[in-house]
Amino acid sequence: MDCSLCKKNIQDVDFKDTIALKRFISGLGKIRGRKRTGLCASHQRQVGRAIKRARHLGLLSATSK
């Protein structure tokens, strides 16, 4: 299974793109694991870092509600 971000040739994950980041968050607000997202290790780290950064700045809510 190949990484969807590698297929689209995305080098860096942007924390301001909240619509794309919501795909990687579960209904309870947790960051989905690599097996669920299908990302490679480097992109999974970037997505996790971007989600945490967006939450800290208030772009994403810390909970699902």
Image: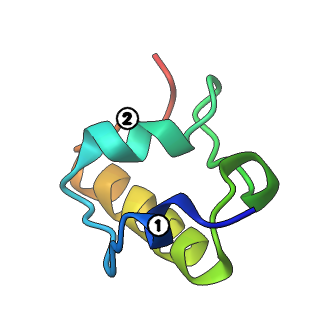
Mark 1 or mark 2: whose residue is earlier in sequence: 1
Q: CA distance from mark 1 to mark 2?
A: 29 Å
What x and y, as percent, mark residue 53?
34, 64
Which residue is disc 2 drawn over?
61
Q: Is 63 drawn above or below residue 4 in the view shown? A: above
State the residue lying farthest toward the right: 35
What x and y, as percent, mark residue 24?
54, 45
Q: Quadrant of the N terminus?
A: bottom right
Mark 2 Cα shell of 10 Å, populated few (<14), some (14-19), many (≥20):
few
**Helix, strand or loop status at disc 2:** loop
What x and y, as percent, mark residue 56?
32, 57
What x and y, as percent, mark residue 13?
33, 69
Q: Is residue 63 found left or right of 57 in the rendered image?
A: right
State the residue lying farthest toward the left: 16
Q: Is 8 drawn above or below residue 65 in the view shown? A: below
Which residue is disc 1 drawn over?
7
Q: Nearer the viewer, mark 1 or mark 2?
A: 1
- Figure colour scheme: rainbow
Q: Amino acid at mark 2?
A: Ser
Q: Amino acid at mark 1?
A: Lys
Q: Residue at x 29, y 37 (%)?
A: 19
Q: Is residue 22 found left or right of 40 in the rendered image?
A: left
Q: Is 22 drawn above or below residue 13 in the view shown? A: above
**Helix, strand or loop status at disc 1:** helix
Question: Count the marks: how many?
Answer: 2
Nearer-the-camera pick, 57 or 11: 11
Q: Residue at x 66, y 66 (%)?
A: 2
Q: Residue 31 shows which numbered tag?
A: none
Q: Is residue 16 found left or right of 38 in the rendered image?
A: left
